[in-house]
């Protein structure tokens, strides 16, 4: 409660930002961050609202729109559904004062928890529309898992068509999800009874496949995860985001 | 959070309510603490996270090294269903540990309609509902907040109540618990007796015997020991500048009701509206100084990044240093794109100068509360606002670009007649006319007036505490009548559900015998009664009938002025003599000046306080 911010050199970043040198024109920085554990349950919309406050208290010199209701411009890469974790989320922030990428990372991380951590900050050079695929690690622990079931799962996701109901704004429709699956592998470990899957799924604007469909498909076809939810679990983690040429998006 | 709880979260709506892990939440090492405190808000996460009192008390308890305070909210119905199906007990937000295993469980009681949630949460914790049925290993259940001023309807469910402001009291209470656990003198009974005997502001209902007269009224309260107080005096924080202030708050990741900085400017209220409980129980007025407020606001901005500061108090424009405070805040808020808002403006102190400063561009609407439709009735309730003042205020609002105004009124106030109801429609019409009389009004936009009418609920510790509530039939007729009087399409009319207000009145003025009804309600699955979609009036009537309670006895009866009241066991600082004088003045249509103009001798000055408006207090602001 002491007014340390009155003293310029020791000012908190949120007040100090106005003393940073102004840039000739706003620039865009890209922020790569993780969203795991508890943070996976924050919806995309709620997270968008929170991030404005995080950026404000971290003292990031964001550029404000010049309209009637000024606000910071923050753009997000891929949406992530509630209940899925990620080690590679991206957002772009426009800044209008000089600050190093290292400093942005440091100041943001001071305002975040481990479950929501900035991993990298750099100048934006690519567009989000270059994103083509996303890679996921999926883990399941429930009744009915085995080595042979892992093999059956791999086959299930290889043979077209695999028709699933997809809900959209215009109602429910049936789609074949196989064309959206670039690759998939599954294995089962006797030691811990966990089935692990690695999947690369389409992730561009027009044909984005929510990884939750893979879980739903296995629930429908193999009756997995249909028991007591306090004894069974699964997790989905997005681990990489890829371009058309299968190189990492940056 | 363990993987299994995680699976449940994938099955419920808005899992962000339950996952925890918010920035600013406090995690302590279980080995290094001596008492675990579960602070429960008996409503949804979104509402509970918005409560300033919880933020303050959470911080104050966690300042203590020996104490770990965690938060608990009422699970939404879909979550509760999973918890009951899979036998998952109610857990605390930070650790995920079962609340049942805590040392102390506190409930904040903000409104009567949350009582069914309190009981439902106890049931989900698997703690016996009644204090008398709890064993030595079960937590101590404590209640506090405005409803604790008449705790009697829920008294059998609580071990103890904290009366008044809790930031110092709860810490003392928990420290006494730690001490008695440490030196081996703790038993539930010994601890509760010691609390009642040695700590100020704690009411242990099981230590008082209540007897009743043949007509159902209360005969007397008798303390079981002669070393405990016959009346429990409320606690206050004397110097608000020195009161504990949370520098860091828990930041919700999901949208909550009050998603902004809440800057508590002062406590109490200089007005004395005769229906208003808050205006009486939080007396005396105690202000913070502008410098302290400014650095607290900065501090909260640093730790939250919120884009709005809401200056909270019962009537913000009554703050004696409002100009100095807003000037100081504006020195840094504009630079940081932070806007100021004043949620509780009175029409008589609404100035263009103040409006220009707060200029909350985000809203095109303003709210005023004339409460009654005629000057006569406004005098009866001591509102001390004239129609001219209301029209001048809306004129100013229209001048600065607003085009819609919300007006709050109440039906069923004592002495109300149909001409008072017509007055409500008249005021709304005059506001519309004022819009067209305002020369620089917003051009090209339609004016809109929203008239929102609630039902009067007589509340303990007010001059109207003895009054009968209008019957539901009468309230419904009045609501219908007003509807026929509002013909202008530019005036929108809403009214509260009179059935909810009636149950609220029963619970507000109830005594211990209501506990049977509440227990039955809980057994029948009542919950979220403050939510329209769950409230079921007919089921409430059935519960009262089954438990031999006549709701009219509590809601619609004129209480005798010499009767023993269920809340006479509590001393809120303001005397019964004052309430009686105010009641008499109401019936004569006489107003009482506010504390700043003249002291009316309410009695609250005996509680002390720095920067009050009480003339008999040494540090009066005059």
Image (cartoon, coloured by chain):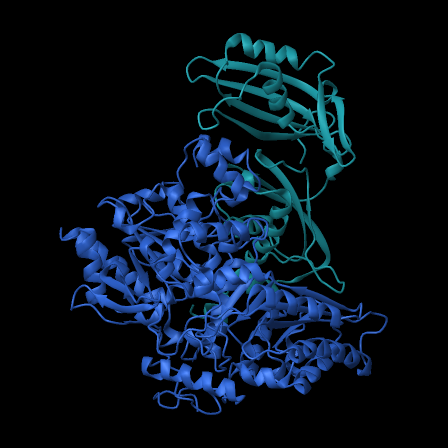
Chain colours: A cyan, B blue
- The answer to whether residue A117 is visible is no
* On-image quarter of the N terminus of chain B: top left
Q: Residue at x 74, y 40 (%)?
A: A127
Judging depth in this view, the residue of B446 and A71 nearest the camera is B446
Q: Residue at x 33, y 79 (%)?
A: B607
Q: Is residue B587 above or below residue B81?
A: below
How far across and down, in percent of the image, does residue A27 sit?
A: 71, 52
Quarter of the view holding residue B621: bottom left
* On-image quarter of the C terminus of chain B: bottom left
- Is B114 on the left-hand or right-hand side of A198? left
How far across and down, in percent of the image, does residue A163 sit?
A: 72, 18
Judging depth in this view, the residue of B612 and B291 nearest the camera is B612
Please identify the residue farthest to the top as the structure is shown: A148
Judging depth in this view, the residue of B415 and A126 nearest the camera is B415
Please identify the residue farthest to the right as the structure is shown: B444
Q: Residue at x 46, y 55 (%)?
A: B114
Please identify the residue farthest to the front as the structure is shown: B214
How far across and down, in percent of the image, does residue B572 sit?
A: 36, 74
How far across and down, in percent of the image, does residue B507 sit?
A: 44, 61
């Amino acid at each position: 409660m002491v007014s340390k911010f009155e003293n310029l050199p020791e000012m908190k970043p949120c007040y100090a930002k106005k003393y940073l040198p102004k840039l000739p024109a706003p620039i865009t920085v890209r922020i790569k961050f993780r969203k795991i554990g508890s943070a996976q349950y924050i919806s995309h919309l709620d997270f968008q609202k929170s991030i404005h406050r995080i950026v404000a208290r971290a003292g990031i010199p964001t550029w404000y729109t010049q309209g009637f209701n000024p606000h910071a411009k923050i753009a997000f890469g891929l949406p992530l559904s509630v209940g899925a974790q990620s080690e590679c989320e991206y957002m772009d922030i426009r800044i209008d004062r000089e600050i190093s990428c290292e400093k942005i990372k440091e100041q943001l991380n001071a305002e975040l928890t481990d479950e929501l951590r900035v991993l990298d900050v750099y100048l934006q050079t690519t567009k989000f529309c270059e994103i083509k695929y996303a890679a996921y690690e999926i883990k399941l622990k429930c009744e009915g898992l085995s080595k042979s079931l892992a093999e059956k799962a791999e086959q299930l996701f290889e043979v077209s068509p695999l028709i699933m109901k997809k809900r959209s704004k215009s109602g429910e429709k049936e789609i074949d999800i196989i064309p959206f699956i670039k690759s998939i592998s599954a294995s089962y470990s006797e030691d811990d009874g966990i089935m692990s899957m690695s999947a690369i799924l389409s992730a561009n604007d027009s044909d984005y496949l929510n990884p939750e469909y893979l879980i739903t498909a296995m629930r429908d076809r193999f009756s997995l995860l249909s028991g007591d939810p306090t004894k069974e679990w699964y997790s989905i983690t997005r681990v990489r985001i890829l371009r058309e040429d299968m190189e990492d998006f940056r | 959070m363990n993987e299994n709880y995680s699976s449940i979260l994938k099955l419920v709506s808005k899992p962000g309510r339950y996952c925890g892990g918010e920035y600013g939440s406090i995690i302590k090492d279980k080995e290094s603490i001596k008492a675990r405190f579960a602070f429960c808000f008996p409503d949804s996460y979104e509402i509970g996270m918005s409560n300033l009192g919880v933020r303050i008390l959470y911080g104050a308890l966690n300042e203590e090294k020996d104490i770990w305070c965690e938060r608990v909210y009422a699970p939404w119905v879909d979550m509760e269903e999973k918890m009951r199906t899979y036998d998952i007990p109610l857990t605390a937000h930070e650790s995920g540990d079962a609340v049942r295993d805590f040392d102390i469980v506190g409930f904040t009681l903000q409104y009567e309609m949350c009582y069914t949630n309190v009981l439902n949460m106890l049931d989900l914790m698997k703690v016996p509902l009644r204090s008398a049925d709890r064993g030595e290993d079960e937590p101590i259940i404590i209640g506090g907040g405005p409803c604790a001023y008449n705790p009697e309807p829920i008294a059998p469910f609580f071990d103890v109540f904290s009366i008044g402001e809790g930031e110092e009291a709860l810490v003392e209470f928990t420290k006494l618990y730690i001490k008695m656990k440490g030196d081996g003198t703790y038993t539930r009974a010994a601890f509760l007796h010691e609390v009642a005997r040695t700590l100020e502001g704690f009411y242990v209902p099981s230590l008082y015997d209540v007897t009743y007269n043949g007509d159902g009224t209360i005969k007397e309260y008798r303390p079981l020991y002669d070393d405990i107080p016959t009346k429990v005096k409320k606690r206050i924080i004397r110097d608000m500048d020195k009161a504990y202030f949370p520098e860091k708050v828990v930041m919700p990741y999901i949208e909550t009701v009050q998603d902004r900085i809440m800057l508590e400017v002062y406590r109490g209220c200089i007005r004395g509206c005769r229906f208003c409980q808050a205006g009486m129980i939080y007396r005396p007025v105690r202000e913070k100084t502008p410098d302290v407020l400014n650095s607290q606001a900065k501090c909260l901005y640093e730790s939250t990044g919120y884009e709005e500061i809401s200056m909270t108090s019962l009537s913000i424009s009554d703050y004696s240093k409002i100009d100095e405070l807003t000037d100081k805040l504006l020195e840094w808020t504009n630079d940081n794109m932070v806007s100021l808002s004043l949620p509780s403006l009175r029409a008589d102190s609404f100035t263009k100068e103040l409006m220009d400063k707060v200029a909350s561009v985000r809203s095109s609407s303003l709210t005023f509360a004339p409460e009654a439709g005629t000057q006569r009735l406004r005098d009866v309730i001591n509102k001390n606002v004239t129609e001219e003042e209301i029209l001048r205020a809306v004129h100013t609002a229209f001048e600065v670009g607003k085009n819609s105004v919300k007006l709050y009124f109440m039906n069923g106030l004592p002495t109300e007649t149909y001409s008072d109801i017509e007055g409500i429609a008249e005021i709304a019409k005059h506001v519309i006319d004022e819009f067209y009389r305002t020369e620089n009004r917003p051009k090209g936009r339609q004016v809109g007036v929203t008239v929102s009418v609630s039902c009067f609920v007589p509340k303990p510790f007010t001059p109207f505490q003895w009054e009968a509530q209008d019957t539901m039939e009468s309230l419904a007729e009045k609501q219908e009548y007003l509807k026929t009087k509002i013909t202008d399409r530019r005036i929108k009319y809403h009214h509260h559900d009179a059935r909810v207000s009636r149950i609220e009145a029963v619970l507000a003025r109830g005594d211990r015998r209501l506990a049977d009804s509440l227990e039955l309600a809980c057994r029948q699955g009542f919950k979220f009664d403050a939510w329209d979609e769950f409230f079921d009036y007919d089921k409430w009537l059935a519960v009262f009938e089954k438990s031999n309670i006549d709701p009219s006895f509590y809601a619609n009866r004129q209480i005798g002025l010499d009767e023993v009241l269920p809340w006479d066991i509590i001393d809120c600082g303001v005397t019964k003599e004052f309430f009686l004088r105010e009641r008499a003045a109401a019936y004569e249509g006489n107003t009482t000046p506010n504390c700043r103009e003249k002291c009316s001798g309410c009695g609250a000055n005996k509680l002390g306080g720095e920067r009050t408006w009480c003339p008999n207090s040494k540090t009066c602001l005059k």
